[in-house]
Image: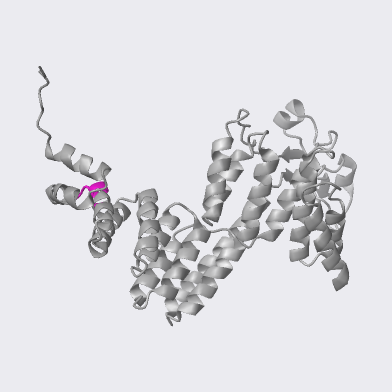
Amino acid sequence: MNFSIKTKKTPEIKARLALRAGKWKTALPYYEEQVHADEQDFAQWNLLGDIQYGSGDVNGASVSWQRALDGFAQESLHENVLGIGRKMVKRCPEETGVHLVISEAYLGLDYFADAISAFRSFTKLAKHATSTEIKSWFRKVISCEIRQPHLLEELTQLLDECKLEDIELERDLQAYVSRMQIQPEREEAEEQPVMFEVPEQETNSSAEQSDDDGMQSLDADWNSGDITFVQHDTPAYSQANGSFGDTPVSPIEFEVPETSEEEDLPAGQGKDHYDLGVVYAEMKLWDAAITEFQTARRDRTLRSKATIELAQCFKNSNDPHRALRLLEEETAVVDAESDVQDELNYHMGVLNEMLGNTDAALSCLERVGAGSGFESDAATLISRLRAAQ
């Protein structure tokens, strides 16, 4: 005899079971009720959009996702915005305004290269982009701190392409670019040790000499008629510190203390950052990838691999000079017989070729060892460079 008691399934359980079985339309009514019960639950709006899309209602999904997107944007939950935004770009490409929201989310995360790229997509794809939207975006950019010269140059080009004919905005952006370019120079100057020197005082005998204009020095004893002016040392200085003329004063040095580098990560702890950096790089989210690879470099077991990936990100962000400097620094600290040297030399050769340094490129490529995985590519590049000479 079966004594099992059947429990009545709640609407929530029924809806979840329907989702597991892929019965989107069956689950849809319950989740529609949920979003109307709490319209500020943006996670539910996002889920409703997924269910609507699964059931074939693309327009309904777009509306629900947009509701979630706007809500998360108002709450400055930038990561949530990016997740929904990328989904909409892929599944609802006609919603071109999403690119603007994505760009603003990148600005909030300080991923400036990605923000500019997304905004450029918005201006190219959105047929009805208003001047108000464009001006608002540039105003938000001006409130950020973008230090990379190539990005500042791209901002100026982008404003020209928009053809707003807003003299005030052009002037403000130009002033912003100038300020951002000057600021790093000031910081570099502040990092230099500041030296102050106190000149040595002349000996007492110099006090008896005449000034250039023939007048007697005020420090000397001199007579004028019946009045005699005699120099007296101040007791406090002469007794406590001695005479300035007798004791040479050594220069006083003021040095700005050097900032200590971040501590190394324990071996293995950089792997998650490295893997995440690879994912971001594949998605062409260069700023995010750079952040992860910089952290991964602090794990000495991954330093060289992360450095090479970091250099690739700089290269893809239109900053090949920085990429080359990074690889050159890494070459100096890596063991000369290490296998990674071949990879470093190859990438330095590629960067030097990009920068027009043919001799330096050949020098790097010729150091790639025989049997290396980069030997064939290096040989091909060497042949091309020699043919062009």
Asked if the stretch drawn in magenta spans residue 290, the answer is no
Estimate the x, y position of residue 199 in percent, counting from the top left.
Answer: 80, 45
Residue at 65% across, 43% down: 306
Residue at 43% across, 76% down: 168
Residue at 36% across, 62% down: 91
Q: Which secondary structure type mostly characterizes the magenta part of the structure?
A: helix
- Looking at the rendering, in which quadrant would you find the C terminus? bottom right
Q: Which residue sits furthest front?
A: 1
Residue 123 versus residue 11 in the image, above or below = below
Residue 39 appearing in the image: no
Looking at the image, residue 28 sits to the left or right of residue 185; the answer is left
Q: Nearer the viewer, residue 236 or 159?
A: 159
Residue 91 appearing in the image: yes
Residue at 55% across, 49% down: 289
Estimate the x, y position of residue 385 in percent, counting from the top left.
Answer: 84, 67
Estimate the x, y position of residue 96 in percent, counting from the top left.
Answer: 36, 69
Looking at the image, residue 366 sits to the left or right of residue 277; the answer is right
Estimate the x, y position of residue 155 in percent, counting from the top left.
Answer: 52, 69
Q: Quadrant of residue 3?
A: top left
Q: Nearer the viewer, residue 46 or 236?
A: 46
Residue 320 versus residue 128 in the image, above or below = above
Range shown magenta: 40-45
Q: Nearer the viewer, residue 144 or 201?
A: 144
Looking at the image, residue 227 sits to the left or right of residue 214; the answer is left
Count of marks, rendered view: 0
